[in-house]
Amino acid sequence: MGLKMIVRQFIWMLGILSCFILGWIVYVIVPNQVLDTPPRGEETPPPDFGLVKTGQKIYGANGCAGCHTQVVRPANMGSDIARGWGSRRTLPVDYYHERNPFLGIVRMGSDLSNVGTRRKDPHWFYILLYNPDKIFPGTIMPPYRYLFRKVRAEGKRNPEALPQELTPGVPSELQVLPSPEAIALVAYLLSLDRTYPIETRAKNHE
C-alpha cells in the first residue's frame, strides 16, 4: 500500500513537472525563437538615441499612444497600406530596439509607424501640436500649447517661431517658440520610419 502511494505521488509530480516544462517551451522558448530572433545586417532597425530617445519618452508621457497606433496591418486585414501608412506590414523585428513599444490603444488618429516618411517639415508638426485645427479642421486632437513658450521678439523674429496668424491672442511683440520638449517630440516623430529592408522576414510572415 505504501509503495503504491509513493508511485502515485511520483507520477503526479512527474505530470506537474511535464506540464510546467511543456508550458515553458510553448510560451517562452518558441516565442523567443520566433519573435526575438536578432535581426541580421540591413534587417536591423536603426536604434533610437539622444534627442529621439528623449522625444520617445515625451510621446509616452503625453499619452499619444492613446489615439495613435504604430502598427501597420497587412493588406488582407485592413487598408493601412492602401492609405499610405506603410509599404509593408509591421513585424516584431521593427520594435527590436524599443523597450516599451507604443503599439497604441485605440486608433482615433492616423497610424504613426512611418509618419517620418510622410511629413519631413518639423514646422508642420509644431503647428499641429500648437493648433491642430489649423492642420485638420474639425479634429478632436487637443492642442499641446504647454509644449511651447512665449518669448519677447527683439528685432528679427526667430525662424523657429510659429507664424503670427497661427497664434491668435498672442500679442505681436511676443513670438511662440517650441520648447525643448516639443523639439525632442518632433525629432522622435520625424525618426519614425520602418521602411528599411526586411524582405526575408516579410516573406516568412505573409
Image (tube, rainbow, N blue to C red):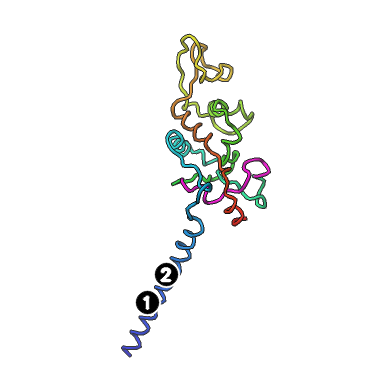
Q: Residues within 10 Å of mark 1 (few under 14, many from 20)?
A: few
Along the line of sight, which residue is nearer the eye, 14 or 31? 31
- Residue 89 is left or right of residue 40, and the answer is right
Which secondary structure is most common in the magenta stretch?
A: loop
Q: Is residue 68 visible?
A: no
Most extreme residue toward the front, as rendered?
A: 41
Residue pointed to by mark 1: 13
Q: Which type of secondary structure does the marked residue at label 2 adopt? A: helix
Q: Is residue 58 magenta?
A: no
Q: Residues within 10 Å of mark 2 (few under 14, many from 20)?
A: few
Who's the residue at 51% across and 20% down the image?
160
Q: Position of residue 137 (x, y in %)?
A: 64, 28
Which numbered disc, 1 or 2, marks the residue that appears first in the sequence? Answer: 1
Q: How many callouts does the rendering have?
A: 2
Q: Which residues are magenta?
A: 81-97
Residue at position x 59%, y 38% in the image: 109
- Gap between marks 1 and 2 measured at Cα: 12 Å
In the rendered view of the protein, which quadrant contains the C terminus? bottom right
- The correct choice, above or below, for 18 with respect to 101 in the image is below
Is residue 165 in view?
A: yes
State the residue position of label 2.
Answer: 21
Q: Amino acid at mark 1?
A: Met
